[in-house]
Image (cartoon, rainbow, N blue to C red):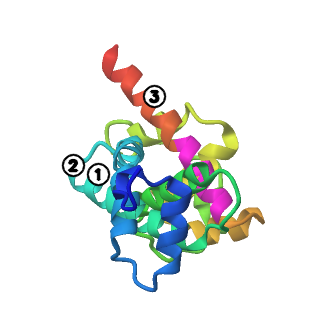
Amino acid sequence: MGLFYTLSEISLDDLVAAAQAQAADDTEEMAEILRRFDGAIMKIARSCTTDAHLLHDAAQGARLALVKAVRAHTLGTAGFTTYAWRFMKGAALREVTSLQTPEIVNDPTKAVWLDQPERDAVSDPTFEVIDLLNVLAPEQQMVAKAHYIGGVPFKDIAEHLHISKPAVTQRFTVIHRTLRIAVEGALAA
């Protein structure tokens, strides 16, 4: 072996250490880390959305989160890939959610937390959305109605349920997955 190595020959842990040693984020080491995670970034973005415009934004959010994960990772601890994956997944979901549903300031104690009112399928376009929400568990329905129909921000949902905002984000990950499966099943039928 020679004295010089290419970045592709360096281990991920060594790249992370080298990137952390630099003050700037636009280093060759960081670029190599981003290149190595590019497939994972796109997989995460595609798991969050199928919309082409949102896909780009979700991927960009995941890339920024990867840089933050490199900065925040404790050197010498195992599991950087899993650690970075969680950072990227959360950032991509937040990016997509923030762009899909603008957060409107609402009082979470209003009727959106109550059971759904009777609706007329012909005159009310939200009937189909509420009908789709019936595939969710009752607590998931309540949270989804509050956010999607009532426009209640995640922060207010978290306060109402006495849980953290990341816990609400995790619940929405499950809700999105369940709804996506339901829609795909309906379209296939």
Residue nearest the observer in this picture, 147 or 122: 147
Compared with residue 85, is residue 26 higher up or lower down, i.e. above or below? below
Is residue 62 in the magenta section?
no
Q: Is residue 104 above or below residue 150?
A: below
Q: As rendered, which of 23 and 65 lies closer to the eye? A: 23
Q: Amino acid at mark 3?
A: Ile
Residue shown at 43% from the left, 34% from the top: 180
The magenta span reads 166-175
Kind of residue at badge 2: Ala
- Which mark is on residue 150? none
Which secondary structure type mostly characterizes the magenta part of the structure?
Answer: helix
Secondary structure of the residue carrying numbered label 3: helix
Q: Please give the label number shown on residue 52.
A: 2
Answer whether labels 2 and 1 touch (C-beta < 8 Å).
yes
Judging by the rendered image, the residue that carries numbered circle 3 is 181
Q: Mark 2 to mark 3: distance in Å?
A: 19 Å
Work out whether residue 49 or residue 138 is closer to the camera in this orientation and state it. 49
Q: Estimate the spatial distance between the alpha carbons at disc 3 and disc 1, rounded to whole Å.
A: 19 Å
- Circles 2 and 3, Cβ within 8 Å, touching? The answer is no
Verify CB contact (< 8 Å) between mark 3 and mark 1.
Answer: no
Q: Nearer the viewer, mark 2 or mark 3?
A: 2
Q: Amino acid at mark 1?
A: Leu
